[in-house]
Image (cartoon, rainbow, N blue to C red):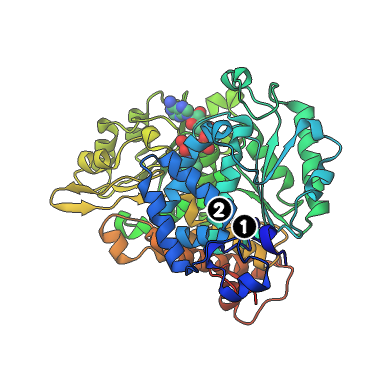
Amino acid sequence: MPRGAALLADPLLNKGTAFTERERDALGLRGLLPPRVFTLGEQLQRSLAAVRRKSDNLEKYIYLANLQNRNEVLFYRLVVDHVEEMVPLIYTPTVGQACLEYGAIYRRSRGLFITLRERGRIAEILREWPHEGVRLIVVTDGERILGLGDLGALGMGIPIGKLALYTACSGVHPYYTLPITLDVGTDSKPLLDGEFYIGIKQRRARGAAYDEFIEEFVDAVGTVFPQALLQWEDFGNTNAFRLLQKYRTRLPSFNDDIQGTAAVALAGLMAALPLLGGPLAQQRILFLGAGEAGTGIADLFVAALRSEGMSEADARARCWFFDSKGLVVQSRLGELAEHKLPYAHAHAFIPTLAEAVEVIKPTALIGVSGMPQTFTQEIVSAMARLNRRPAIFALSNPTSKAECTAEQAYTWSEGRAVFASGSPFAPVEFGGQRFLPGQGNNIYIFPGVGMGALTCGAREVSDAMFLAAARTLAGLASGDDLAVGRVYPSLTRIREVSLAIATAVAEEAYASGLATVPRPADLKADIRSRMFEPVYRDYV
Ligand code: NAD
């Protein structure tokens, strides 16, 4: 137990003005703090007021980052108690702005930067990390940060933010978390030319140089932190699928952009079934965008239908993709990236989305293209003509990239669309009804999946676990949620949601033999007891 100034400098132990009189005497703090002792509740009110006083979201982000680096219990109390207000500040959309300006707002180190120059000594760098027994790593190489593209080393805001969400939502203890940025260069000219860019100034490594670097990193993680779960985050499309496939059975790992997105979107669709009419097996999905998010969703949808007894071919036949060049069909085989191939159907090519909607007659239209305003009035009205209740999910982030707005979806479908978005939309009044658009935020899924996999010591994070997570989340959207058009539970229930998902994921791991620790008698109670609670402990 550190004492005095060292204790105040340790964010996991520091209580600031909440150290009691006894603690101040016993731990050498007398004189180092202002005399009045405050409660956690009083500190919370002061911090909340400080956040609200700032008019600019980036300033709020900076305040919260500093609070996190000073006093983690207080930081997490604030996030947990005001989750709807704080999540958009510590993560999307504010984190996007924070990453763009990461060099300028950089104050204090958090996490590890590992660059190409450290080839041959990555394990040594990992051993520099001050906490032993890391259990959860979020790693990015900064190539596709949110919808912002290649931000190189500035992407560090993402692993830091994601891990904060893990702790806040599912109670993974912050001591065991480690954010990592792999700096393999950047292809962004403005960054390379920038005076204050914080990363290495060279073009992105590709091919063997990149692969060998990642290989050494994964090996080093396995050696230094053998119990760690690795989450791949915001890798470019060309590496994301490959790395996931290559490493998912070598160490417990998953890619949230692919698998987390898949589970949250599928959960939305499953929750919407009572409105759409007909079981999942009767839904037909047309995706705009055939990248990590889109094919991830389709793959999990296929897994869901297969688990209900449908053949793989029949399940895939229910998913159609429209990418930047048009309908994904067999005549385009030569030019299609590998992850699109399973969905290239034997069908005539169709050049426009409007035509594709008319021909394919989807029950659900899912936008994951990053292309704003592509769900036009013509397209949304066609969906509403073809279906009593069409599912229209405009998942592209940030709000400015959404395929259509909530208001457009409701207006153009005469209030019949079952709408979900990637970024939050304000409530919409239409036809005397008030709609609360659901946000298909990955935050509903990954914290619970990670916590569940960690607590049972899962050797692997399987597709079946993501399916279990999706089913659990779908089951938590209540009739009241659906009545206002929301296919997800309120974010205020996130700890309960994450606990339920963690339990379902661990249950699946035990059932499939992937768990490595003995099963506790009451799985849910066991996981609940391990969840980090942001409260102060007495030190003396
Ligand atoms: P990606 O780069 O892997 O894929 C984008 C795809 O869109 C590519 O297949 C590309 O060919 C296609 N595309 C580009 N322009 C197009 C056009 N004009 N018409 C049709 N298709 C076009 O990106 P991704 O990871 O799949 O993410 C896509 C979008 O989904 C992003 O905006 C992202 O913010 C969003 N997303 C949302 C969530 C969520 O809501 N939970 C999660 C992940 C990603």
Q: Is mark 2 within 8 Å of ligand 1?
A: no
Q: CA distance from mark 1 to mark 2?
A: 7 Å
- The numbered mark at residue 11 is 1
| Residue located 60% across and 76% down the image | 22
Q: Position of residue 128 (x, y in %)?
A: 79, 48
- Pointer 1 local density, CA inside 10 Å: few below 14, some 14–19, many at least 20: some
Label 1 secondary element: loop
Q: Position of residue 416 (x, y in %)?
A: 23, 48
Residue corresponding to mark 2: 68
Quadrant placement of the C terminus: bottom right
Q: Are marks 1 and 2 in contact (CB under 8 Å)?
A: yes
Could you tell which of marks 1 and 2 lies nearer the N-terminus?
1
| In-front residue for pair 352/159 | 159
Q: Quadrant of residue 330?
A: top right
| In-front residue for pair 428/386 | 428
Left or right side of 51 for 255: right
Q: Is mark 1 within 8 Å of ligand 1?
A: no
| Residue located 20% across and 53% down the image | 434
Left or right side of 386 for 42: right
Label 2 secondary element: helix
Q: Quadrant of residue 246?
A: top right
Q: Position of residue 187 (x, y in %)?
A: 63, 22
Quadrant placement of the N terminus: bottom right
| In-front residue for pair 463/188 | 188
| Residue that protrudes farthest toward the right in the picture | 120
| Residue that protrudes farthest toward the bottom in the picture | 521
Relative to 496, does residue 105 appear above or below in the rendering? above
- Under mark 1, the amino acid is Pro
- Pointer 2 local density, CA inside 10 Å: few below 14, some 14–19, many at least 20: some
Q: Can the viewer see residue 389?
A: yes
Q: Position of residue 290 (x, y in %)?
A: 51, 34
